Amino acid sequence: MISSLHATEQGVGSKTIVLLHGFGGCSDGWRDVVASLAPSMRTLAYDLPGHGLSLDFPGAGPAKVAARAVLADLAARAVKRIHLVGHSMGGAVATLMALAEPEKVASLTLLAPGGFGPEINGPLLRRYACARSPSEIRACLAAMSGPRARPFDHAADTLCGMRQRPGQLEKLVEIAAAMTRDDRQGVIPRDQLERLAMPVMVVWGSDDAVLPFTQADDLPARFHVHHVLEAGHMLVEEAPDLVANIIQRNMSRRARPIRPRLATATG
């Protein structure tokens, strides 16, 4: 069997938006965001390696593997320029993609991205990885969301169906254990983030129980940071209209040149 990366494609516009879900999710999670985007937009929503229809992708788990896989798939599709959006683990993947091939990324929108600080709610994510029934999944999604989040009935049913595939639950448990080892996550160094010249928007809910919104502090001055009051970690499901609006606003911004730091003369 040939292992491949799955993506759901919609629209036929000249601009391509690539959407990367968070841990334990799938491409279907973006459906309300896609519905709120301008109809002229082409979207590619991926199932990340180890998730959904990309479950059998070899080496699935690390964000670096996912970043290389999505870049390779885009190259195979002859997609030369993208507007890149990532949520949570997908945000870490998106950031690594932008660092690896910055010329390909026209804008970068990060929703509560992974890798921006060591703190992570390991117990909640490991509980989410083990959740099998719609009620268990719904309870985890609610715990990850803000106080005004809508019921997660559709998302819970979709994710329950995904987890019924042989090997899916075990793979999520494996990824969660590696991702939250010692209840810490890997961090992308701030000096690497300084290299990103494309428009970058970082969006974080004020009630995020998975990754604290303070991880958006002290980012490069070029980055735009948007805090969403009373929203939690599940921004894609909690505020799809707002997310779509932010993506389109970031797409219209222009890249700023990075000024080289002046060398200090000694002697």
Image (tube, helix red, strand yellow):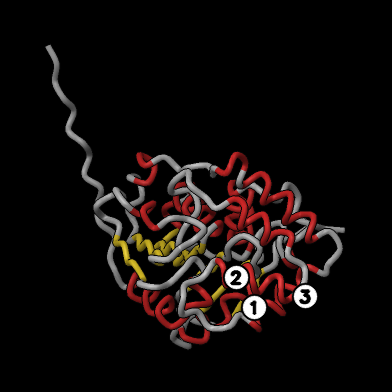
**Which residue is label 1 attached to?**
155
Of labels 2 and 1, earlier in sequence is 2
Q: How crowded is mark 1: few (under 14 residues within 10 Å), some or many (20 or more)?
A: some
Q: Label 3, label 2: how many angstroms apart (C-alpha)?
A: 15 Å
Residue 141 disc label: 2
**Rendered-image quadrant of the C terminus:** top left
x, y (%) of residue 179?
62, 47
x, y (%) of residue 25?
64, 67
Horizontal side, residue 29 vs residue 250: left or right: right
* Residue type, label 3: Gly
Taking the spot 18% from the left edge, 28% from the top edge, the residue there is 263
**Rendered-image quadrant of the N terminus:** bottom right
- Of circles 2 and 1, the one toward us is 2
Q: Label 2, label 1: how many angstroms apart (C-alpha)?
A: 9 Å
- Please say if the residues under marks 1 and 3 sit with CB atoms less than 8 Å apart: no
Of labels 3 and 2, earlier in sequence is 2
Q: Residues within 10 Å of mark 3 (few under 14, many from 20)?
A: some
**Which residue is label 3 attached to?**
161
- Please say if the residues under marks 2 and 1 sit with CB atoms less than 8 Å apart: yes
* Element under disc 1: helix
Quarter location, residue 124: bottom right
